[in-house]
Image (cartoon, rainbow, N blue to C red):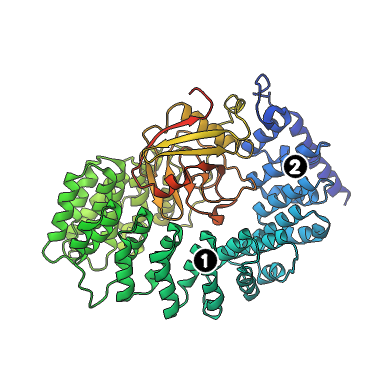
């Protein structure tokens, strides 16, 4: 026991001493307009950015509760299990704010041990802290018993009900749920409860993988479709997809045709894909002419799932009537798939040659991959080898892999196999991040036999040529394939080492509610940045904006009712910078219009960011949220792939 005490003393002493040997404060001569005028808060934030767990644990014992609180929030981003005991001890802090920050950080760690300690101190906490504890318990849940602990609570306070359903939702996203959780979520659709409680209950119902009992609650789910919140209605539309009743299908059809919110119409279109009959097919075809582009895209995406024996749709004629090029390409893929005389394929090829829109070209190449007779792989390969634009190359590679995967590929002879060998060798040696990653993934398909005939030396050479840290995602794909070829377990690729400190000179003049204007080809979007909650991300974003980095970049990724994403230097999502920044996880929730950092995993963020179409709670605590749209959310909802960012300007600043 004495030895244990000495060891513990040495650990604490070491942690405290490391806190004292602080680096010079880079912001000491700056005049700050935000909370970081406090030099100690800057130091704690730097230690968070550097992932210095020991220093942050020492700050948990600081005499100033503000610094203890900040250290606990910092550890929520670091997510180091070595902080577990220190955070558990901080649950007994005299400051409610420290307890709340510690509970949130424990939720981010997700360690089941924390549930006992959090439940032990629960009753004595103020309501705001209790809400955080309930959510954290859900994040730490490992068993049905843990989930039931949340579901069986009977709170009178509305805020605690919100925390309760949020905890139930968090547990469900970890695969932990129970019949009681489902019953609670159904009960919390009650219109007398707050909108946030009803929304979270509907998220549970939409994303719960165990939907087999939903038919038993059909009446209550259907009643919820009259909810004034479009976020509740859109999630319940998704939940209805699991109920195989004619009434449910009719309700989804009514939502698709009549609901005032495009978010609800999008989810209704997706939900209807599960019902493959002529009436539903006609509803989706009608939705191809909806005024909102994302509804059109969602309806078109479901059409390839319909292959009805008596369907006489002339897909080529229908495609020619569609204005949205992305949806048009999807419908053209159906025409190409049923093409017996190459009429549709020739039309697509001609359209490809005449359009100047690189994104349209990419989607058209994908459409050509659906021909069940000729497959057009040679034409697509020629476009791949040209490498005229990264997006075209990426989509060409996607199309070629799609063809190779198709079991109906009747022309799969020895020459075709040799051609594909050449295609994958070209891609691996291209030094193109997307092509290397996609080819590496294709080489791992066991049935294709590349493990026995592809030169692993080419993979190793490709890995050696990767510029890091910007090609972290491609490195991961290559490492998986090399491990597969070598017959061993996948290699765990560590995240990039710390390489980009926070520039306090950029942050100093920014107010806590600093606004930026994102000017786009569709219109202007005003965003308020979370300067004090995500300083590293904000500093990086502002630095790039001032350099004009975002000017002329495309929104390269649009997922209806999810996100619009931009900032990629390549324009296809595989581009990055020669440095990376750290993930920052504050108690910020992804609502409609939240600005977040895209990543290839924790601590790999750089230049790509996204804006959410609607609340997306599955992103909370996993992707850095660093701002929110305060004007122009309608512009975000109308955005299409290929729309441009013309400039990002700090409001009230000369850039």
Compared with 272, 646 (above or below) is above
Q: Is residue 22 visible to us here?
A: no
Q: Earlier in the sequence, mark 1 or mark 2?
A: 2
Compared with 581, 407 (above or below) is below
**Residue at left 34%, top 62%?**
299
Indicate the secondary structure of the residue bearing disc 1. helix
Q: Nearer the viewer, mark 1 or mark 2?
A: 1
CA–CA distance in space, label 1 to label 2: 35 Å
Compared with 28, 580 (above or below) is below
Crowding at label 2, few (<14), some or many (≥20) Cα neighbours within 10 Å? many
Crowding at label 1, few (<14), some or many (≥20) Cα neighbours within 10 Å? many
Q: Which mark is residue 291?
A: none
Indicate the secondary structure of the residue bearing disc 2. helix
Is residue 473 shown left or right of residue 158? left
Q: Position of residue 145 (x, y in %)?
A: 69, 71
Q: Position of residue 198 (x, y in %)?
A: 60, 63
Is residue 189 shown left or right of residue 524? right
Q: Residue 443: name its quadrant.
A: bottom left
Is residue 534 shown left or right of residue 486? right
Q: Which mark is residue 69?
A: 2
> In the image as oriented, which residue stretches furthest toward the top?
29
Q: Which residue is mark 1?
A: 206
Q: Position of residue 431 (x, y in %)?
A: 33, 40
**Residue at left 56%, top 38%?**
528
> In the image as oriented, which residue stretches furthest toward the left?
341
Q: Are marks 1 and 2 in contact (CB under 8 Å)?
A: no
Q: Position of residue 65 (x, y in %)?
A: 80, 39
**Which of 256 and 326 lies nearest the eye of the viewer?**
256
């Amino acid at each position: 026991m004495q030895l244990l005490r000495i060891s513990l003393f040495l650990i604490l002493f070491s942690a405290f001493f490391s806190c004292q040997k602080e680096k010079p404060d880079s912001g000491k001569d700056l005049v700050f307009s935000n909370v970081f005028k406090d030099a100690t808060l800057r130091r704690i934030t730097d230690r968070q950015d550097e992932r210095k767990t020991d220093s942050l644990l020492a700050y948990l014992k600081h005499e100033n509760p503000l610094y203890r609180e900040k250290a606990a929030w910092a550890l929520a981003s670091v997510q180091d299990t070595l902080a577990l005991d220190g955070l558990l001890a901080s649950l007994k802090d005299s400051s409610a704010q420290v307890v709340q920050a510690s509970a949130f950080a424990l939720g981010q760690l997700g360690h089941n041990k924390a549930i006992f300690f959090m439940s032990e101190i629960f009753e004595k906490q103020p309501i705001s802290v209790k809400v955080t504890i309930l959510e954290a318990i859900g994040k730490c849940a490992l068993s049905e018993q843990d989930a039931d602990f949340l579901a069986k609570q009977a709170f009178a306070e509305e805020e605690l009900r919100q925390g309760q359903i949020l905890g139930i939702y968090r547990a469900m996203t970890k695969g932990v749920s129970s019949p009681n959780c489902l019953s609670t979520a159904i009960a919390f659709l009650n219109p007398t409860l707050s909108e946030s409680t009803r929304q979270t209950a509907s998220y549970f119902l939409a994303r719960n993988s165990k939907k087999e009992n939903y038919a038993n609650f059909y009446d209550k789910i259907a009643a919820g479709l009259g909810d004034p919140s479009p976020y509740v209605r859109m999630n319940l539309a998704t939940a209805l997809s699991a109920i195989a009743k004619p009434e449910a299908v009719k309700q989804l059809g009514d939502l698709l045709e009549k609901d005032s919110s495009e978010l609800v119409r999008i989810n209704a279109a997706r939900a209807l894909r599960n019902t493959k009959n002529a009436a539903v097919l006609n509803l989706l075809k009608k939705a191809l002419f909806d005024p909102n582009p994302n509804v059109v895209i969602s309806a078109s995406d479901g059409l390839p799932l319909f292959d009805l024996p008596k369907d006489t749709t002339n897909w080529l004629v229908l495609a020619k009537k569609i204005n949205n090029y992305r949806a048009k390409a999807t419908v053209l893929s159906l025409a190409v798939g049923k093409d017996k005389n190459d009429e549709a394929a020739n039309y697509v090829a001609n359209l490809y040659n005449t359009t100047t829109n690189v994104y349209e070209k990419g989607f058209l190449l994908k459409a050509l991959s659906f021909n069940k007779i000729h497959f057009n792989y040679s034409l697509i390969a020629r476009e791949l080898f040209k490498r005229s634009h990264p997006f075209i190359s990426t989509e060409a590679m996607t199309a070629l892999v799609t063809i190779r995967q198709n079991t109906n590929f009747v022309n799969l002879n020895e020459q075709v196999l040799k051609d594909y060998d050449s295609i994958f060798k070209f891609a691996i040696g291209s030094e193109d991040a997307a092509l290397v990653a996609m080819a590496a993934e294709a080489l791992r398909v066991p049935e294709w036999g590349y493990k026995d005939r592809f030169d692993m030396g080419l993979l190793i050479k490709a890995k050696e040529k990767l510029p890091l840290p910007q090609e972290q995602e491609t490195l991961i794909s290559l490492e998986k394939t090399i491990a597969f070829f070598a017959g061993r377990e996948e290699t765990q690729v560590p995240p990039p080492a710390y390489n980009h400190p926070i520039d306090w000179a950029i942050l100093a003049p920014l107010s806590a509610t600093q606004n930026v204007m994102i000017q786009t080809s569709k219109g202007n979007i005003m965003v308020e940045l979370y300067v004090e909650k995500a300083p590293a991300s904000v500093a990086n974003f502002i630095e790039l904006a001032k350099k004009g980095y975002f000017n002329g970049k495309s929104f390269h990724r649009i997922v209806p009712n999810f996100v619009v994403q931009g900032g990629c230097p390549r324009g296809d999502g595989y581009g990055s910078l020669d440095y990376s920044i750290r993930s920052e996880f504050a108690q910020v929730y992804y609502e409609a219009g939240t600005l977040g950092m895209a990543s290839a995993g924790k601590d790999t963020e750089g230049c790509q960011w996204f804006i959410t179409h609607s609340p997306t709670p599955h992103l909370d605590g996993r992707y850095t949220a660093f701002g929110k749209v305060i004007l122009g959310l309608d512009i975000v909802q109308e955005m299409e792939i290929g729309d441009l960012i013309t400039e990002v300007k700090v409001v009230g600043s000369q850039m």
